[in-house]
Amino acid sequence: MAALERFLIRRAALGLFHGHETFEHYAPFCRNPQLVHDIHLKPEDHLPEAAAAAKQAEAAQGQGPLRLLYVGRADPMKGALDWVEAVAGAVQQGADIEAEWFGAGPDLEAMRARVAALGLQDRLRLPGMVTDRAAVLAALRRAQVFLFCHRTPESPRCLIEALASATPIIGYDGGFARDLIARNGGGLLVPMGDAAALAAALAGLAADRGRVAGLIGRAALDRAGFDDETVFRHRSEIIRAHLPGVE
């Protein structure tokens, strides 16, 4: 499959690659590579500006646990067990945290067993698959941190969905995540695979809610342009510019 992909990409007059990780991987094989985003969020899916400001102000007050969320498959490539260890490590350092993982997958039962072994059932909720889109969107908007532990190069749309809800992304470093927050710093990244560093970062945020509020404000800035209308317009402009005669 890899050889076929390279063959097709080399023959293409134009390559549109979703996200920085994908672009970096395939650009060397393409005559005219372009970085784009392929997302399905509508402008109205973004948390309204007034609500984002209220979310930031509430975080600054520092009342209650720091609210963490992840939405995605409970799978080794998503670092599901790293996620549990990062939250557990932060709690062991005294952090007041509540965390939820929405999603099913092969690691879900192992995650639940580990949470039970750590005695953290009151801190970590693992409800499995949540199919109600409104409930997922509400959780994204309520969360103060979107915690992720992706262990493979990918371009996960869930990070964009978090930013659209003015929720800073905190997790393992990678080209895609780094690019998303390059303009305003709406998140924090630690070395790939370093769950201990992630735990320390979470503990630091739980102890400094003013910093959390600042990250929420910057995440609200980094979401600009991440909606289906804007990215479709961007792709259309690229096609018109590089493939004359295509309408």
Image: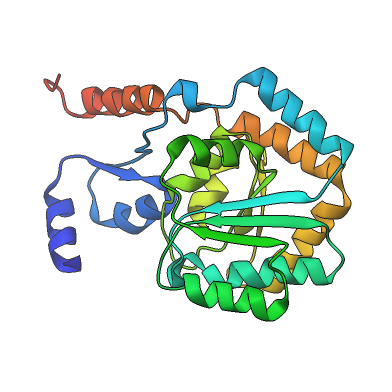
> Residue 32 is drawn in which quadrant?
top left
> Residue 240 is drawn in which quadrant?
top left
Going by the image, does 192 lie left or right of 201? left
Q: Number of numbered discs present? A: 0
- Tell me residue 157's x, y (percent): 43, 45
Q: Residue at x 79, y 67 (%)?
A: 91
- Tell me residue 198's x, y (percent): 70, 65
Going by the image, does 114 lie left or right of 90? left
Is 199 located above or below residue 101 in the figure? below
Residue 173 shows up from this direction: no
Q: Quadrant of the N terminus?
A: bottom left
Is 74 located above or below residue 158 in the figure? below
Q: Residue at x 88, y 53 (%)?
A: 207
Q: Residue at x 75, y 71 (%)?
A: 89
- Tell me residue 141's x, y (percent): 61, 36
Is 74 located above or below residue 205 in the figure? below
Residue 242 shows up from this direction: yes
Give the camera-side residue of 68 and 40: 68
Give the camera-side residue of 99 and 212: 99
Query: How did the renderer colour the structure?
Result: rainbow
Q: Quadrant of the C terminus?
A: top left
> Residue 121 is drawn in which quadrant?
bottom right
Give the camera-side residue of 58 and 168: 58
Q: Residue at x 25, y 24 (%)?
A: 241
- Tell me residue 118's x, y (percent): 71, 78
Give the camera-side residue of 15 and 49: 49
